[in-house]
Every structure is written in C-alpha cells, then in structure tokens.
Amino acid sequence: MGSVVPLKKSANSAYLELKNLLSEKLQKVEGLIQQKLKSDVDLIEKMSSHHLSSGGKRLRALLTLGSAKLSGYNKGGRDINLAACVELIHAATLMHDDVIDNSEIRRGKKTLNSIWGNQSSILVGDYLLSRCFEMMVEDGNLEILKLLSSTSTEIAQGEVLQLQHKGEIDILEETYFKITSSKTAALFSAATKVGAILGEKNAKYKEALEFYGKNIGLTFQIADDTLDYNSNLKLFGKEIGNDFFEGKVTLPIILLYQKVSYSEKDLLKNLFNKKIRDKDELNYVLNLIKEKNIIKDCYKKADHFINLASNALSIFEDSKEKTILKNLATFSIERNF
C-alpha cells in the first residue's frame, strides 16, 4: 500500500499528539456541547447524552481546532464554539443515519432509534441541528454561517443520493465518491476551512485547508467502509458486515464486483437485491474479498487521498501542528482504535 502501512504507529500517535496539544480546548468543547444539550424536555437531554456518551474520536472538532492553530488563531474562544458546532452537526447526521439504516449498534452501544424509536431520534437530531445554527449566528461571521449551512445541505444531499443508489451493485466508483464527498468529506473540509477563516488567512490558504479536509474525509470513509469487511465489534465499536446486511454498496463491494467472474457477478447482484441477507452469505462475500485482495485495493485508493491531504499543507510554514496534521492524514486509514 505504498507509504501507508509503515506509518501505522505514527498515524495513531499523530491523533494522540493532536489531542494532547489541544487538550484544554477540547475539554472546553466537551463542556460547551454538554451545555448546548440542555433542554426543558427531559427526553432530549437523555437521548443526546446517551448518543454522545458512546464515545467518538472528536476528530472533526480536533481538525477545527488544529486548523485554527495552524492558521495563527490565538485569541478568544470562537474556535471552541465552532468546533462544538461541527461535532453537533456530525452527531445529528449520525442520529438520522441510524434511522435510515435501521442500525441497532453504534460504537458498541445501542442506537437511539433502537431504544426510543425512529420519530424521537429524528426530532432530537433536528434539535441538535437547530442548536448548531444558533451557535453559527452567535459567532457572527457570515462566511462561516454560509459555509456550515451549505455543508449541512450537502450532507443531506449525499444521504439522499446514497439512498437512491441503495443495492445497486454495479454503481460507478465516480458515483460512490460523489456520495462520499457529500455525506462525509464535506464536513471534514468545512471543519478545516473554518480554521483558516478564524486565522484570517487569504483564499489560497483557505482552499489548501479545505482540500486537506476533503481528502482526510474521503480517506476516513474508505477506511470505515473497509473496516466493515475487516474488523470486529469489540475493537471498532461496530459489527462486521453491517453495511452488507443493510444492503449498502460500498467501495469494497464495488471493487469486488469489478474483479469477479460473470457468474459471481450474478450471485452478488442477487444477494444485494434481497431484502434480507444472512451470515453464510456474508462469509461468502468475505471469502471473495480475501481471494481478490480487495482490502489492499481499497487501501491503495485511500493512499492517493492521503498523499493529496498531506501535500495540501505544504504552503504553510513548518510548525508542530503542521507536522501532526500531515501525519494525521494516515490516521484515518491506519487507526487501530
């Protein structure tokens, strides 16, 4: 996989270094998130707390804070407010995702919809998005308001596009990456661009950080899709094969379909046209994926985006945060937690 495999240790350490570098600010982000979850409606607090207590790497918040620091922002707490805002947008989209996918487990815990039902989950997700818009208005910067509001629109469009192509095993890679760019990479790129805006950088630096974030996001989604065919619930907080059982056609399946025989194509197409798939059928697909080296192929795709992300930071002066953010590019694909 080129340069990615040897960097596994530094990839994980880069995430921890960034977390340690920004630990005080990240604690304030957590405190602000808890504050914004308060409501006169007990169920909103209970459901929001359950979802957010399930963990998460707070990677989008860290990217917002790290990009702001890289861009020279060092006054006030706008970065904290906007990092919390980005995380709440992410939390809201996950709540909606779990309803759409009928997911029962997220990060090793029961999903909101599996406990309280779909209607409450959708409404609480909407509540979080409403709080986000309040926070954007509080910040007062029209460029940031436009960026994050348009990002929310783009995420929704990506989700609908994915739903539209659900079960289409012959989906083009181009369509897959269009979906991924909208539903995942858009929020990553917004998070990093926010940092450049806070640092009052010119258009060239804003575009560089936006491009960096987009490619981090693409890598992250490839990793997430690949883990679903190459992981376990205990280590990554999700059951292997979730995407398969839900009928999602992700990159491993797209690449597999390209490499198998015509008879195997027909079998795969029939599998993804079924309403319900079982564990024996999952094992059949897992064996094909192993036989055709699909995981390695996915990593090669990710390697391309990792290099793009890393190179995007070249216009910034050397600094500790630049080094960490460059190394962080490999974390998305090589993380072991």
Image (spheres, rainbow, N blue to C red):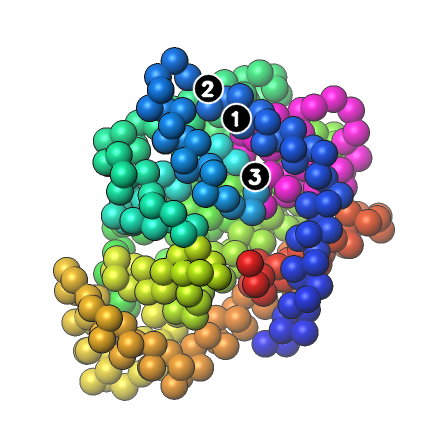
Q: Is residue 246 visible?
A: yes
At 52% from the left and 36% from the top, the residue drawn is 87
Mark 2 or mark 3: which comes first in sequence? 2
Q: In the figure, is residue 253 to the left or right of 330?
A: left
Residue 276 in percent (x, y) is at 16, 62
Q: Of helix, strand and loop, which one carries label 1?
A: helix
Q: Residue furthest top?
A: 40
Quick check: marks 1 and 2 in contact, CB under 8 Å?
A: yes
Q: CA distance from mark 2 to mark 3?
A: 26 Å
Query: What residue does disc 3 label?
Result: 190
At 26% from the left and 57% from the top, the residue drawn is 246
Q: Is residue 11 above or below residue 194?
A: below
Q: Amino acid at mark 2?
A: Lys
Residue 253 in percent (x, y) is at 34, 70
Q: Is residue 181 above or below residue 6?
A: above
Select label 2 or label 3 by which is in front. Answer: 2
Please tell me how many numbered marks the rendered image carries.
Answer: 3
Q: Of helix, strand and loop, which one carries label 2?
A: loop
Disc sitting over residue 34 in the figure: 1
Disc sitting over residue 69 in the figure: none
Q: Is residue 197 visible?
A: no
Residue 229 in percent (x, y) is at 39, 69
Select label 3 or label 1 by which is in front. Answer: 1
